[in-house]
Amino acid sequence: MREKIDDILFTLGCNIERYQHPPLPTSDAAKELCIERSGVQIKNLFLNDNYRKRHFLLLTTPEKKIDLKVLSKQLKVSRLGFASSRRLNHYLNGQPGHVSFLLLVNDQEKNVELLIDQDIWQAESLQAHPGINTETYVLSKVDVVKFLKYTGHESKIVYVPIANSEE
């Protein structure tokens, strides 16, 4: 997987910073290990609607606890929820803890819609696993756009609502 992604990024002329590290199955794991990397850290959530007809990859900040009910209404989607690992493997050829927008290269049929938190999109560069959680790539926003254009995926920049902590 990583080789395929590397080949594409090289062909596109993307400048990549690469970091190797112990496995980081969650966005919190990097904080716990005090791993410093450039670029904005991302929490990747693979979601689907209530009917499991539409699938979404949501990129947001690690500290956000998302209000999926409000996000569903905002997107006019019937009840968003977390998609199964089976669906993640089927649509993105990925596993939990190894997901990033770079896996969209495996979604040839464009079944997955990319949602990017507006707070993330303000950053100059973004972090992403290349299909394996022992490495992190940092790509400039320009290179992210090049990559998404290559895959044929359009991104939708969204306001990501925060869940009420009293619930």
Image (cartoon, rainbow, N blue to C red):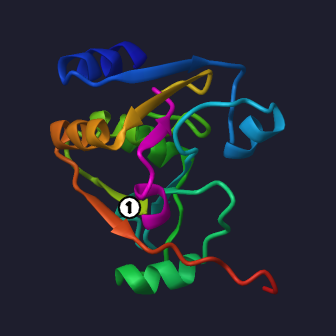
State left or right for residue 62 relative to residue 28. left
The picture places residue 149, in percent across and down from the top left corner, at 17, 43
**Label 1 is placed on what type of residue?**
Leu
Q: Residue at x 49, y 63 (%)?
A: 119
State left or right for residue 2 relative to residue 143. right
Q: Is residue 9 above or below residue 66?
A: above
In this picture, which residue range is highlighted in magenta?
Answer: 118-130
The picture places residue 88, in percent across and down from the top left corner, at 47, 44
Residue linked to disc 1: 115
Secondary structure category for the residue under label 1: strand
Displayed quadrant of residue 63:
bottom right
The picture places residue 8, in percent across and down from the top left corner, at 24, 21
Displayed quadrant of residue 157:
bottom left
Is residue 99 visible in the rendered structure shown here? yes
What is the quadrant of the N terminus in the image?
Answer: top left
Q: Nearer the viewer, residue 30 or 152?
A: 30
Q: Residue at x 55, y 83 (%)?
A: 69
